[in-house]
Image (tube, helix red, strand yellow):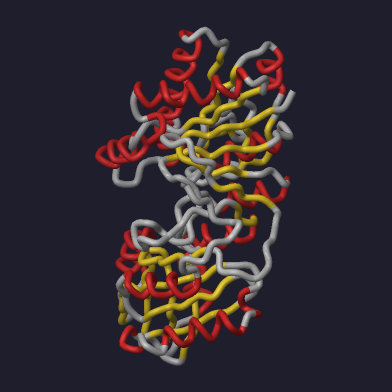
Amino acid sequence: MNTIVLKFGGTSVADNEKLNLVANKITTLYDEGHNVVVVVSAQGKKTDQLLNEACELDKTPNSRELDVLLSSGEQVSISKLSILLNQLGYKAISLTGWQAGIFTNNTNQNAIIEHIDTSRITKELSLGKIVIIAGFQGINSNSDITTLGRGGSDTTAISVAAALNARECYIYSDVEGVFTSDPKKVAEARKLKEVSYDEMLDISNEGAKVLHNRCVEIGKKFNIPIIAKSTFKEDEGTIVNNKIESQTVKSLVKNDNLIILKIKSDCINYMSTYNLFIKNEIIPIEFIHEATGIKGLFNSSDLNKINNLINTNLKEYEILIYNISRISIIGYGISNDTQIIKQITDILNTTNHYNIQKIDINNGKIRITFKTTVPNSILETLHSKLVGRAKSWFFNHC
């Protein structure tokens, strides 16, 4: 009997009406004869709510206790879903991370799964039960609860799928799949039918929020197809697998959540400064030693940490911080396609007033970094020229 793993995000289980919709999808697969394992996130914005409540008590809560608190949101979701499925006449059981045998390292808020003991899961499946697992959490060597950080439920789902040798892993959310660009920024963006693991990693790493990069990495390692689809529509979604298409642009990602930090000094030590950021859990995207000092590129989500670091350790330096945009053009082998590169160059030649800082080209993507934030119109122009309205087998036309 095939095992299928399903993951439902917070918006998918936000209220009882949506839980009934989720239950229908689960029972449909169960009735088809599959073993069904379900990973669930906390309802709606519950995790953010719990974090805010903790920070009202202490601006820097104890990391162990914070994990205990944050993990409670998923426990509410799994118990409610299991209660509903049992009421509908299906045998279901909810398991917390530790009950499901998910063992992690000792890092709080960003733990890494090291091992999954599947004995409890397989036992419950053998009894004909639907197994509902709390995402985003595990247990460490001290028997303490840990959480997996952003995208943790995606990571839980694909890790469980790998441990069970599942046929495939479905990631359900309020997003219909992977698009040629963000539909909120590009009206012509279309859903992709298929995308390779490497292309999906590039899309995720450049700022798209469809799938977490750790989820994709594990899917690639164990060659488990990942299907990203909407809980609220019956469309097919997008399949992420190991198929690689010939050179073509698959997706364009515009990331406005980037900041440049410049530390002006002729004598600042590069490695000491770099280590200072790492020690404070701030990981630079780029960290460059220049003649006038150091320039770093960071995610804007790190801004509060950066400001705290400046106020405590870097007060003596002249520091400049500002926002920038980056557009990444993604597709296998596009860096070898002179026609695509010429098209991009022609478009960029008409946008000099946007202050292009640099262009990076490698096998799977072309990244254009601007000195400031730029409007979505340039993304729309690039998308129109590089993807356009061409019909191809990988577009899912509804």
Which of the 4 image quarters holds residue 121? top right
Q: Nearer the viewer, residue 382 or 119?
A: 382
Eyeballing the image, is 231 above or below 315? Answer: above
Q: Is residue 242 visible?
A: yes
Which of the 4 image quarters holds residue 322? bottom left
Residue at 41% x, 67% y is: 254
Residue 359 appears at what percent x and percent y?
Answer: 50, 82
Eyeballing the image, is 40 above or below 173? Answer: above
Q: Nearer the viewer, residue 370 or 230?
A: 230
Residue 34 appears at what percent x and percent y?
Answer: 67, 23
Residue 13 appears at what percent x and percent y?
Answer: 40, 29
Residue at 46% x, 87% y is: 346
Q: Nearer the viewer, residue 194 or 152?
A: 194
Q: Is residue 316 visible?
A: no
Residue 348 appears at what percent x and percent y?
Answer: 42, 85
Image-based side of 380 in relation to 225, left or right: left
